[in-house]
Amino acid sequence: MLKIIIPTAMLMPMTWLSKPSMIWINSTTYSFLISLVSLSYLNQLGDNSLNLSLLFFSDSLSAPLLVLTTWLLPLMLMASQSHLSKETLARKKLYITMLIILQLLLIMTFTATELIMFYILFEATLIPTLIIITRWGNQTERLNAGLYFLFYTLVGSLPLLVALLYIQNTTGTLNFLIIQYWAKPISATWSNIFLWLACMMAFMVKMPLYGLHLWLPKAHVEAPIAGSMVLAAVLLKLGGYGMMRITILLNPTTNQMAYPFMMLSLWGMIMTSSICLRQTDLKSLIAYSSVSHMALVIVAVLIQTPWSYMGATALMIAHGLTSSVLFCLANSNYERIHSRTMILARGLQTILPLMAAWWLLASLANLALPPTINLIAELFVVVASFSWSNMTITLMGTNIIITALYTLYMLITTQRGKYTHHIKNINPSFTRENALMTLHLLPLFLLSLNPKIVLGPIY
Amino acid sequence: MLRRTLLLGLCRGPLGRGLGTHRGGSILDRDGKMSEIKKKIQSILPGGDWNPLYDTSHLPPESSDVVIVGGGVLGLSVAYWLKKLEKPRGAIRVLVVERDHTYSRASTVLSVGGIRQQFSVPENVQLSLFSIDFLRNINEYLAVADDPPLDIQFNPSGYLLLASEKGAAIMENNVKVQRQEGAKVCLMSPEQLRNKFPWINTEGVALASYGMEHEGWFDPWCLLQGLRRKVQSMGVLFCHGEVTRFMSSSNLMKTASGEEVNLKRIHEVHVKIDQSLEYQPVECAIVINAAGAWSGQVAELAGIGKGPPGTLQGTKLPVELRKRYVYLWHCPQGPGLETPFVIDPSGTYFRREGLGHNYLGGCSPTEEEEPDPGNLEVDHDFFQDRVWPPLAQRVPAFETLKVRSAWAGYYDYNTFDQNGVVGPHPLVINMYFATGFSGHGLQQAPAVGRAVAEMVLEGHFQTINLSSFLFSRFYSGEKVQEHNII
């Protein structure tokens, strides 16, 4: 594990000591190398975990998330080059440092063994993200967005700290590897119900669950591109990952306690998808679609069947890559037209045909076209929830249709039709942008050839 | 040595000296940094006047999809139609930047407020026809919940254009065009004129055209306030400031015929706050130039006209300020309530104002006697020399008039062909014009606003085809000359 952590930490002095012309090149290349190193962790042993040290371990659930995190850093750096070009050198280096610190904390979070260490790093990831959103965001509303983001997560996770300390006191350990085997079934007393709530609320807010999702559209829309990418792709998955880890301790209370959250997720899925149909701001549309996809993950984790866990893991990876590429596409639009409103930039297919191809592929992935892993994941979740209760199929089916509707609406509004007069002179697509989209979409589509990597420990 | 340092440290250290006093230099304060830090700490402590969370509510937002430069009737009309015609409601964010909230020099409120369809260019007739429909149904268009309905005091008294022998043939042609477009105009001979309007002296008049419906005058201030109220309720932001700079980026591109053009797009508008050095850069996708008489200056800020003359880059926006006077007089023996808006062949015009035998009128000066547009001072000699004699000749009752008051206003005068400029600029591709109407902007504002909004949202004119009013005619030289200009 040190072979990933130390190079990531050393990326910081490398950024500060690089020549001005080389900061982007150095940081992007070396973070790429680190991500290629992390690919070795995908070589997992069945349903057991790869125990690397007392502090770090990785199993088939955390390894794909780890690879996603390390893969995303070079992509974030590539995406940020344009909007930071006018800043001073020190600011650019500071921005890159924030991204690297965030990366470091995320890597350690996904591979932590001790749940307290996981908690501390989980909270610590808020700080660089907050700095990125409030300092480099686009509008004045970013202060409000940062506040919402920070306080929703903090308030949700304070009970988690208390619960973890309580579990440490009663069970004697919070080391995940041990607690898997020591977890005793807990009865449904009031205190255990509160324990369940305390453990789960932090992750519910992070996912986010439909009733607690208010911070997400704000944070996503106001964040700069790298902030949006890392928020959508990785930080939301922290919630899913945490839920999947902590539900081991909470059986069988989950069977009763899950009901209200299942209702909220199932209903919220449809609500947020419908909101997407009425969105005029492109980034806001993609943010709400994230809520909708994550609601599927919540449903899957709360059902706790083998198929649903496989679906949840695959959906996290698939959604990470898909929504990250959609944000990059929206950003490439924004950098040219300086507005995020969809109807002001129409008919881009005639002007930027290659970018239209990426738009098409990303949209097709978003609406879970076979044989992408998006489809495999959604299908597993839908089938598992059907077995949990037959009624959910109507809601899930409606959600799939509405997802297809808003994704195609987004595609057709931005790409098809006659272009507007004021976008005639936009810059053609840069190689950097095309490379960015390829590097997102290539893993996504290659994974459909071998999805068992991302199907988690149950496979 | 040590003793001296100790002495200095004990007696003349920075805090020992008292904040703010500085005599000579101590070792600790050699470059003045310490006193700066002290000043800063002093201002942060309670009682100081530094506030880290400074109030920015007077500043415009940091970004807006559409920035409309100018908050007169044309600017507000464009804002209204943009918000009305946008497909998903609330999609576009519009910011209207107006530097004078009292509208003290705006052409809209200083206007005489007439509306007519008697133009020679068919597009002008269509524009006025739609505008009168808008004005007649203004409370359906501009209704705001819980607010009283608007009363624009439309007097449908019609326009009476008089033509001498020379202009009679042109007038007949014009009336034919107007009738084709749907205006209700009738031609009158001097006999019929004398029968209908006994107060008129038909000497020198060969033909007259009288608008029978949809013509008259109204209260421009009411229209402005109605639009402002409605537009604010639709979510348009207003900013009290002045546009001082456009930041643009340009791309060298090749047209289909192979020639190279430099297409610019404005990506930021610097709005300077009134009576302050503060400015806010507003990131925008589209800029609409509706600055009225000052549109030429705004266009120059965007770099329109900076190039070798005779090329498209060097074609300026030919809109400039022209001062026009309006006089209000009282004449108890004057024409009665049926008086239309009379326009004499000499260019003098007058109309009835109110019910107390008051009349408004004026005359457009010729090119040689154009007054200096630097201020809005009224020249009363102009009335004595240029306005009164033709008036008195045309309406003998006006020999005994008494001028009550007068004011001056600006025309956004299009020196090229006195017709409006509508639509995008060919080179600065995200600047749209809605200006240059040379005295008939108020009456065509609702229709022009709709046309510009269609151009912005759809890319082409949908209801009224104003493609002959585009900017490119200044370069290609195709004049759309309007003959019936007051």
Image (cartoon, coloured by chain):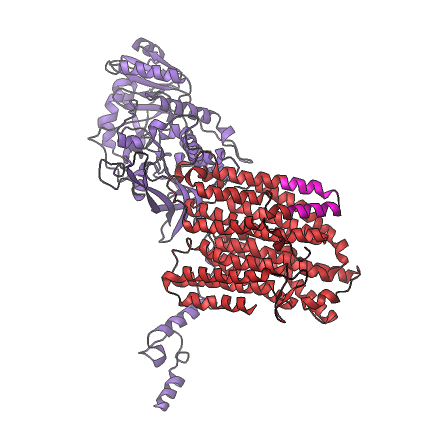
Chain colours: A red, B purple
Q: Is residue A4 visible?
A: yes
Residue A264 place in picture, x, y as percent: 68, 48
Q: Residue at x 63, y 39 (%)?
A: A401
Please, is residue B3 above or below residue A270 in the view? below
Quadrant of the rendered image containing residue B310? top left
Q: Nearer the viewer, residue A386 or A188?
A: A386
Query: Is residue B249 found inside the magenta-colored segment of the image?
Result: no
* Count of numbered circles on the image: 0
Residue at the top extreme, as displayed: B191
Q: Is residue A419 left or right of residue B418?
A: right
Please, is residue A416 above or below residue A437 in the view? above
Quadrant of the rendered image containing residue A459? bottom right
Q: Is residue B301 left or right of residue A162?
A: left
Rendered-image quadrant of the C terminus of chain B: top left
Q: Nearer the viewer, residue A265 or B482?
A: A265
Q: Is residue B18 left or right of residue B300?
A: right
Residue B239 place in picture, x, y as percent: 42, 45
Q: Nearer the viewer, residue B356 or A352?
A: A352
Predominant SS along the magenta part:
helix
Q: Residue at x 45, y 59 (%)?
A: A28
Quadrant of the rendered image containing residue A398? top right
Residue B378 place in picture, x, y as percent: 27, 35
Task: Write the start and end of the magenta stretch as one range.
Answer: A377-400
Q: Residue at x 75, y 54 (%)?
A: A257
Q: Is residue B64 left or right of residue A323?
A: left
Q: Is residue B199 visible?
A: no
Q: Residue at x 67, y 53 (%)?
A: A310
Rendered-image quadrant of the N terminus of chain B: bottom left
